Image (tube, rainbow, N blue to C red):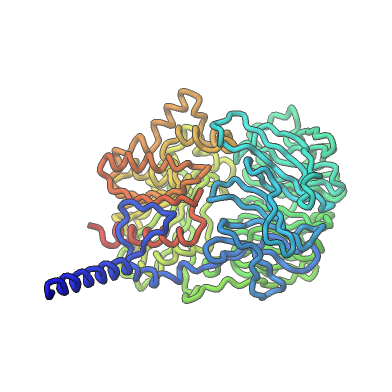
């Protein structure tokens, strides 16, 4: 009897011990598959919690009648739409779904009816829905077998322009097309098709004030786009920039179209006559371009004309900072600059009253928040406050611009955030490479990354290698086609620069990046295997040939212009030669590979390939894949576990190397 009691006692103790150990570690949720990631101490969750609770808020749309805003902000696990009744009010949640909702508006003809879009599991196959006042069940407005995106509203505010294209459920397609339709969300039966366009790189639509014409951009690449006019009743189209028959010396990039009030011209941004996209007016009858506004070596990245056609709002990208400018649309003269807080502005949302302009502003010490400008009185009002609970945001470190010379003597730039002086000795470095490649590292709020800087004393460098935007159209084309690895060499030159810095430790460098930045991470790991301590690849390209063959068809042609056409034998051989998966035998540093199972851009098979190839060569590989994510992690629960694992990986590789 005593022996039985002894056995029961021992078993009870073992159960308690196992339960205690289980409670001491973080278990990934059911949607995550974690391979080779060591147990994450539960104590870490409480320690880093303040760095996971940021809730950036962005402006989405105004109420059509009232002076109220719809904003996007995380609610629980994902971003949802909220209504802000007046400045300073607590946002009231409007949507409540398992999937993120980032776009929505109150329909002008029924101001209590919400029209919004969302995808499923990150697959980017967006659908539009109508949520009626007091309605419990949203009504699907679009063909669920296709990808559907809003292209804006008519000036009469009675139809929404809908662009739709097929997805690759039935297999790979060549020569994809895009359908344009006018959708009445209140009565979809009234909707009508306008045209079928060749290719899928269309967008930036703007209706004339009488709704008889629509202008749009045909996007070929970051360096090449065409401006078209279409007759709404007939669907007939003509190209207006560059005009038919014109043969510019180099490609032209234009966008941010806005029909002038009288219908005689378009306000837009274009680089036709220089390196940067400038603000201009295109006279449609003659094709004449008139440039105006304050200029410099920067791009105009957003242009929005007020509903009454009298005021232009413009955002310029000045050394990575989004700067808001206002102009009188008739005289084209600059209006007084709004007194915005320090930070970078983005998004231009006009109220129907043409007086209130909403924008979102963020800085190193403030998550994104919404401000409104009264353009008549040049008065700025803060509408939301994204609090940084448990942390002193004033202590977050600012980014400093840096430059270095690359292998060919070209100057490459970026930003560094150095940890506080309390961290003694040379500091380890995380090099974080942006995606795109038509993207740009810009100073702003770093969110979770502040933990690495403020708590672990790690310096963060964000480079803008050749191929980045913001430095002119010559620079953005320097990595195209067979020049792909020149951008990788820019990182090698950055490593040389790090070695010259008295406060940085060139022997402790980790590289991380997502999407194209993920490719760059893997390329650095194969080209400079002895110069890094670890690499974190998030949804990155591992094999350019299989990537181009398997990315969604509506994206394939756009990517071929950038990377090269895999159907061409010479290009295919080159892409195979430089692909990280075919050079995995050169990798020495441990890898952490992160992927969303539903990614339509970089299919999860890219991650599977590099994981298998690296492990075959005995490289330690941590692998995290999410069944309910796409091109990045949009759910807080998934992003949090990824953050915990990243901390463990960074500490192991940079702070406690074996």
Q: Residue at x 79, y 71 (%)?
A: 377
Q: Which quadrant of the structure image shows residue 10?
A: bottom left
Residue 615 relative to residue 121: left or right: left
Q: Position of residue 651 (x, y in %)?
A: 31, 61
Q: Nearer the viewer, residue 406 or 425?
A: 425
Q: Say above or below: 89 vs 109.
A: below
Residue 62 relative to residue 602: left or right: right
Q: Say above or below: 411 vs 324.
A: above
Residue 331 relative to residue 7: left or right: right
Residue 170 relative to residue 619: left or right: right
| Residue 362 appearing in the image | no
Q: Residue furthest top?
A: 569
Q: Residue at x 66, y 44 (%)?
A: 148
Quadrant where the N terminus is found in the figure: bottom left
Q: Nearer the viewer, residue 476 or 184?
A: 184
Q: Nearer the viewer, residue 56 or 189?
A: 189
Q: Position of residue 601 (x, y in %)?
A: 52, 42
Q: Position of residue 518 (x, y in %)?
A: 43, 46
Q: Residue at x 57, y 66 (%)?
A: 75
Q: Position of residue 261 (x, y in %)?
A: 85, 51
Q: Nearer the viewer, residue 421 or 561?
A: 561
Q: Which quadrant of the structure image shows residue 339?
A: bottom right
Quadrant where the C terminus is found in the figure: bottom left
Q: Residue at x 54, y 32 (%)?
A: 171
| Residue 83 appearing in the image | yes
């Amino acid at each position: 009897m005593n022996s039985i009691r002894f056995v029961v006692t021992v078993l009870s103790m073992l159960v308690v011990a196992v339960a205690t150990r289980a409670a001491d570690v973080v278990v990934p949720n059911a949607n995550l598959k974690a391979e080779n990631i060591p147990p994450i101490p539960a104590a870490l969750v409480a320690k880093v919690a303040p760095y996971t609770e940021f809730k950036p808020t962005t402006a989405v749309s105004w109420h059509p009648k009232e002076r109220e805003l719809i904003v996007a902000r995380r609610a629980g696990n994902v971003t949802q739409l909220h209504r802000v009744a007046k400045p300073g009010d607590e946002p009231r949640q409007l949507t409540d779904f398992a999937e993120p909702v980032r776009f929505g508006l109150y329909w002008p003809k029924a101001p209590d009816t919400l029209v919004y879009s969302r995808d499923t599991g990150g697959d980017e196959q967006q659908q539009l829905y109508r949520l009626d006042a007091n309605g419990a069940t949203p009504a699907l407005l679009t063909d669920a077998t296709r990808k559907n995106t809003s292209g804006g509203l008519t000036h009469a505010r009675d139809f929404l322009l809908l662009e739709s294209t097929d997805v690759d459920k039935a297999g790979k397609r060549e020569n994809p097309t895009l359908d344009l339709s006018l959708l009445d969300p209140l009565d979809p039966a009234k909707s009508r098709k306008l045209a079928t366009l060749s290719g899928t790189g269309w967008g930036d639509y703007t209706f004339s004030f009488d709704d008889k014409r629509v202008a749009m951009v045909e996007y070929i690449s970051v360096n090449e786009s065409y401006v078209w006019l279409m007759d709404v009743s007939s669907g007939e189209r003509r190209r207006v920039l560059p005009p038919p028959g014109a043969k510019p010396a180099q490609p032209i990039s234009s966008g941010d179209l806005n029909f002038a009030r009288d219908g005689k011209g378009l306000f837009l941004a274009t680089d036709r006559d220089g390196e940067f996209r400038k603000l201009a007016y295109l006279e449609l009858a003659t094709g004449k371009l008139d440039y105006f506004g304050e200029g410099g070596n920067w791009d105009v990245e957003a242009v929005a004309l007020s509903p009454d056609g009298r005021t232009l709002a413009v955002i310029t990208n000045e050394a990575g900072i989004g700067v808001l400018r206002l102009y009188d649309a008739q005289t084209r003269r600059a209006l007084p600059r709004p007194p915005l807080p320090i930070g970078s502005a983005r998004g231009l949302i006009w109220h129907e009253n043409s007086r209130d302009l909403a924008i979102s502003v963020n800085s190193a010490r403030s998550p994104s928040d919404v401000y409104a400008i009264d353009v008549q009185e040049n008065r700025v009002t803060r509408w939301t406050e994204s609090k940084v609970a448990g942390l002193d945001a004033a202590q977050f470190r600012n980014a400093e611009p840096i430059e270095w010379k690359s292998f060919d003597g070209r100057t490459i730039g970026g930003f560094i955030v150095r940890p506080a002086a309390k961290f003694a000795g040379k500091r380890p470095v995380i090099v974080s490479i942006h995606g795109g490649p038509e993207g740009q590292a810009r100073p702003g709020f770093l969110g979770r990354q502040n933990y690495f800087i403020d708590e672990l004393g790690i310096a963060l460098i964000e480079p803008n290698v050749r191929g980045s935007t913001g430095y002119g159209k010559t620079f953005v084309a320097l990595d195209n086609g067979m020049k792909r690895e020149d951008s990788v060499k820019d990182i090698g030159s950055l490593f040389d620069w790090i070695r010259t810095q008295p406060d940085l430790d060139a022997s402790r460098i980790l590289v991380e990046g997502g999407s194209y930045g993920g490719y760059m991470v893997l390329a650095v790991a194969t080209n400079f295997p002895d110069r890094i301590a670890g690499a974190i690849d998030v949804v990155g390209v591992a094999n350019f040939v299989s990537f181009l063959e398997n990315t969604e068809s509506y994206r394939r042609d756009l990517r071929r212009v950038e990377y090269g056409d895999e159907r061409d034998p010479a290009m295919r051989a080159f892409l195979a030669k430089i692909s990280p998966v075919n050079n995995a035998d050169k990798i020495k540093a441990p890898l952490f590979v992160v992927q969303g199972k539903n990614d339509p851009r970089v299919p999860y098979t890219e991650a599977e390939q590099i994981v298998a190839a690296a492990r075959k060569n005995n490289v330690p590989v941590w692998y995290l894949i999410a069944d309910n994510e796409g091109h990045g992690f949009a759910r807080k629960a998934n992003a949090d576990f990824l953050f915990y694992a990243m901390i463990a990986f960074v500490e192991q590789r940079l702070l406690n190397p074996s």
